[in-house]
Amino acid sequence: MRYLDPKNDLIFKRVFGEHPNITISFLNALLPLEVGNEIISIEYMQTELVPEKPHLTKNSIVDVRCKDLVGRQFIVEMQMIWTDAFKDRVLFNASKTFVRQLQKTEDYIKLKTVFALSLIDDIFEKESEESYHHYKLTNQTDLTKTIDGLQLIFVELPKYKWKNLNDKKLNILWLRYLTEMDKLMDMQKANISLPEEILQAMELTHESNYTPEQLAAYDKYIDAIRTEKTLIAEAEVKGEARGETRGKRQTAINLKKLGLLTNQQIADATGLTLSEIEAL
């Protein structure tokens, strides 16, 4: 019996949107919570963020939304493909959640921190080896002074790879659950004990827990993501090709202005055809 990919929309929402004990363990492992401020209990909330004035803004839907006993709210999203607009959408949803905490007559002191945890199955910080990105408002002249009302956490899942099979840190086990399920299975075979929440989450990914209709939706989601990634890759290749051509044309124009080379020499230097050089 196969394990399904927990990053798939259907599985992710089943595991983390319906089982509070699993979600508590997951959030405590991955959020930047101070010692003594861990999550003890949560209550699931509506995932559709409906605006108070529909004509002024728009609805948005998140994967998991919940709050704990002290009123902190947590938004969890699994994003298979990175886009530049995604970070803005996360900020928008977190801000909306933060503002909507208060009724008109309530005091601002009742506002609680909103954490937005985004798990990205893509690499968006290609220049950095860091995979965990934590954002909050910070005083730029004194970095010890912060405003914690909004905290955004982005995790680049493809950057996580571990060689140590015996590492049982909870954050590593949860990231391994999302990215290297086979490694958790190897740990089981090696009789390495795993937390109950991890084992329960693994069980929830068994194919046997889903109906044929749900499995069809699972496969359809995979196909849609694969298609979207292909289209994005093709667009990037075309964009690079257009950019390269523009660069060559500009170089040729500059060389012609200098008047030191023949058109044929410029064509040889840039890779453009002689007719293209003559047309510039």
Image (cartoon, rainbow, N blue to C red):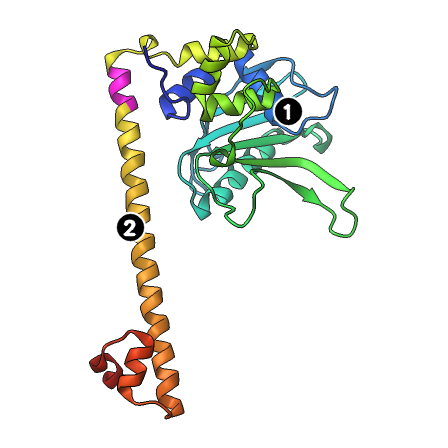
Q: Residues within 10 Å of mark 1 (few under 14, many from 20)?
A: some
Q: Position of residue 134 (x, y in %)?
A: 62, 38
Give the total number of marks visible in the rendering.
2
Find disc 2 in the rendering and name its residue: 234
Q: Is residue 96 above or below residue 212?
A: below
Q: Earlier in the sequence, mark 2 or mark 1?
A: 1
For the residues bearing labels 2 and 1, Cβ distance under 8 angstroms: no
The extreme left residue here reads 275
Q: Position of residue 107 (x, y in %)?
A: 71, 31
Q: Is residue 35 magenta?
A: no
Kindly state the secondary structure of the residue where label 2 is placed.
helix
Find disc 1 in the rendering and name its residue: 72
For the N terminus, the image quarter is top left
For the C terminus, the image quarter is bottom left
Q: Is residue 274 above or below residue 208?
A: below
Q: Tell me which residue sits at (27%, 75%) in the image.
A: 272
Q: Is 100 on the left-hand or right-hand side of 189?
A: right
Q: Position of residue 274 (x, y in %)?
A: 22, 81
Q: CA distance from mark 2 to mark 1?
A: 42 Å
The picture quadrant where one finds residue 37 is: top right
